[in-house]
Image (cartoon, rainbow, N blue to C red):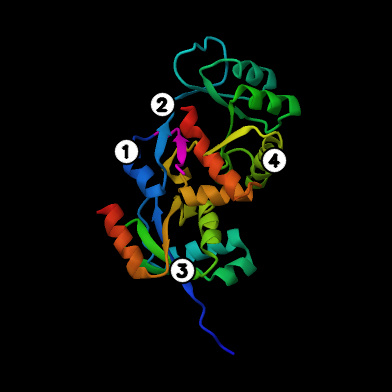
Amino acid sequence: MIFKRKLRYVLVEASRSVNLGDEREERDLRSRLHGVMGEAAYFRANPRTAAQLSESVFIISVNRGCEKDLGLALSFVKTLGSESVGFWTIKTSGTVKGLKAQFKKLYG
Amino acid sequence: MQFFDIVALKETADLEPLARRLGYRRIFALGKDAEIVGDVRGLGENGRFIVRSKDNETLLKAMRINSVVGVVVEDGKAEGKFIEELRSRGKLLIVPVAGITCPLAEGRMRALYRAKTLIRSALRGKAGIALVTLAEGRDCLLSRTQMQEMAKLLGADDRAADAMLNSLGDAI
């Protein structure tokens, strides 16, 4: 039986501006997460960029139950492209709408 | 519960809005809220100090000084006597996470094992632990939820993880 997996959305801030609309940067982030998490955990979490809200703030979707793994994995990602970067998980929500509201509240 | 962090940022940054976004009650700054020193000579009773050393003797001496809030064990080795002294004097074992996430000289796995051993000894000896980033750059900062997960990775349960992020608030 095929069933739909529920997602959780994580609001992530980067220490510098990142452009995840650029396919190369997004692919680089995914490959670094894959390297940190390992094949099985990455497949289980299935992280995807859901939306970019500003130069340094974006939303990543993961399968429900894996949001803490994503936070930990992001702690170890310190390079993107050729530049150094840090990622901070700010909030987690079940909807993109909820995170957008949080974004407005936190970043004004 | 309120959570705290301490950083050694080289660049100037407004820590208050950053602390709010990252989920901390407050982010302390080294040089402003506390000083980090490598030696106990000349340490007075005024101010707040964190002593960072490889030498256990220096760290034991540091624990007898009232103005010292905690110690950073650089080589990651802590004997039973050392942990007992930490507990009885009410000082904190400060474990910097920047050495794990942004390792300089040694590899990440080595730093992880070192921190895990240290935390395990301190938890067994019921000594106070403060898990902090001690970040020198913004890239090495972590949010509160990331730090909680890091504490669990290093062998703490949920309650101990929260205590590790809370303990600095009472000390400084």
From the image, which quarter does the C terminus of chain A lie in?
A: bottom left
Q: Residue B120 carries which label?
A: 4
Res A11 quadrant in image: bottom left
Give the letter of the chain under mark 3: A
Tell me which amino acid carries mark 4: Arg
**Which residue range is magenta in the image?**
B1-10
Q: Residue B14 carries which label?
A: 1
Residue at (56% x, 26% y) in the render: B70
Q: In this view, does B153 lie to the left or right of B146?
A: right
Tell me which amino acid carries mark 2: Asp
Q: Is residue B4 magenta?
A: yes
Residue at (51% x, 51% y) in the render: B146
Q: Can residue B97 be seen in this view?
A: no
Q: Is residue A53 left or right of residue B40?
A: left
Q: Taken as a whole, is the magenta stretch helix, strand or loop?
A: loop
Question: Residue B56, relative to residue B130: is it above or below?
Answer: above
Pinpoint residue B155: horizontal percent, then vertical percent.
66, 47
Q: Mark 3 points at which residue?
A: A8
Give the letter of the chain under mark 2: B
